[in-house]
């Protein structure tokens, strides 16, 4: 099934740089040295990981999990959009991909502090008659 994949500006720029770097005329994004379809990336992926300090156990597929986690933890992208960006049909799959960073969890509970600050609490209970339960 054909899918539309949305790319951010950094991804587009990186792909354009890759296209300019290629020595072979090819319509492939990452061709092999002969300009044909690359069938193996293990050695290149290991070189990239070593060069940028990524653990050698990090798999290429882990990038999808990282992408989902960054979006989910940002607090700026709703879960449905994360699901669509990952092209998952079932939201349960997205939940397995998108984990929340600890800081996102901390930020989540800070919302309660904001809601119950002096001014916010006054507005929250304004006009509400709070009485103890009488049995």
Image (cartoon, rainbow, N blue to C red):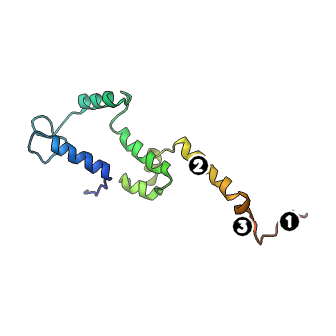
In the rendered structure, find residue 107 and report the number of the disc placed on it.
Answer: 2
The residue closer to the viewer here, 43 or 23, is 23
Position of 52 with respect to 104 (left or right) is left
Give the quadrant of residue 53: top left
- The residue pinned by badge 1 equals 131
SS under mark 1: loop
Tell me which residue sits at (71%, 67%) in the image.
Answer: 123
- The residue pinned by badge 3 equals 123
Q: Is residue 23 visible?
A: yes
Q: Which quarter shows the N terminus?
A: bottom left
Where residue 26 appears, as percent x and y from the top left, is 11, 45
Tell me which residue sits at (34%, 31%) in the image.
Answer: 52
In the rendered structure, find residue 19 and report the number of the disc placed on it.
Answer: none
Tell me which residue sits at (71%, 57%) in the image.
Answer: 117
SS under mark 2: helix
Q: Is residue 29 visible?
A: no
Question: Is residue 117 shown above or below 36?
Answer: below
Crowding at dot 1, Cα within 10 Å, few <14 / some 14-19 / many 20+, comes out as few
Contact (CB < 8 A) between labels 1 and 3?
no
Where residue 10 appears, as percent x and y from the top left, is 31, 48
């Amino acid at each position: 099934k054909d899918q539309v994949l949305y790319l951010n500006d950094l991804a587009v720029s990186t792909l354009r740089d890759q296209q300019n770097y290629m020595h072979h005329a090819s319509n492939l994004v990452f061709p092999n040295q002969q300009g044909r379809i690359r069938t193996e990336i293990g050695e290149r992926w290991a070189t990239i990981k070593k060069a940028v300090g990524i653990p050698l156990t990090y798999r290429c597929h882990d990038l999808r999990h990282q992408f989902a986690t960054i979006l989910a933890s940002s607090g700026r992208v709703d879960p449905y959009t994360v699901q669509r960006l990952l092209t998952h049909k079932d939201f349960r799959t997205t939940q397995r991909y998108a984990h929340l960073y600890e800081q996102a969890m901390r930020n989540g509970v800070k919302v309660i502090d904001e809601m119950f600050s002096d001014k916010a609490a006054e507005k929250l209970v304004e006009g509400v008659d709070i009485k103890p339960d009488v049995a």
